């Protein structure tokens, strides 16, 4: 499924909200507590979850084992 189509479909659910990338999130992503790997997309995902006090739902083992964000899988 093309990304645009997937996003349009996923955001139809009433409990899904797209959060904008803010300057604060960008700054947080550059200053995450160690240890964290250097993937900038993952850094922004984690920073967004931290800034909004959200549980991060991910199958990514690197995100799930990072101790400074709450995660859930299965």
Image: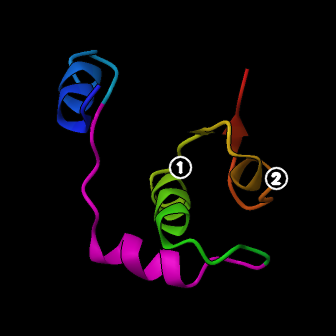
Magenta stretch encompasses residue 27: yes
Placement of 74 over or under 33, stated as above or below: above
Q: Residues within 10 Å of mark 2 (few under 14, many from 20)?
A: few
- Front-most of residues 14 and 57: 57
Along the horizontal axis of the image, is 14 left or right of 63?
left
Q: Secondary structure at mark 2?
A: loop
- Front-most of residues 40 and 3: 3
Where does label 1 land, which residue? 53
User: Image quadrant of residue 24?
Assistant: bottom left
Image position, residue 10 (x, y; %)? 29, 23
- N-term-proximal mark, 2 vs 1: 1
Q: Quadrant of the C terminus?
A: top right
Q: Quadrant of the N terminus?
A: top left
User: Image quadrant of residue 31?
Assistant: bottom right
| Disc 2 to disc 1: CB gap under 8 Å | no
Where does label 2 land, which residue? 65
- Front-most of residues 46 and 61: 61
Colour pattern: rainbow
Placement of 22 over or under 63, stated as above or below: below
Magenta stretch encompasses residue 57: no
Placement of 32 over or under 18, stated as above or below: below
Q: Secondary structure at mark 1?
A: loop
Give the magenta range: 17-34
What is the CA distance from the residue labelled 2 to the residue labelled 1?
A: 17 Å
Q: Residue furthest toward the front?
A: 1
Q: Residue at (80%, 59%) from the top-left corner? A: 67
Q: Residue at (70%, 73%) from the top-left corner? A: 37
Q: Residue at (23%, 19%) from the top-left corner? A: 9
């Amino acid at each position: 499924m093309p990304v645009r189509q997937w996003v349009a479909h996923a955001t139809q659910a009433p409990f899904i909200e797209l959060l904008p990338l803010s300057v604060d999130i960008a700054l947080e992503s550059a200053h995450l507590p160690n240890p964290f790997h250097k993937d900038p997309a993952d850094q922004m995902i984690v920073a967004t979850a931290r800034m909004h006090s959200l549980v991060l739902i991910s199958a990514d083992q690197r995100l799930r084992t990072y101790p400074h964000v709450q995660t859930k899988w299965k």
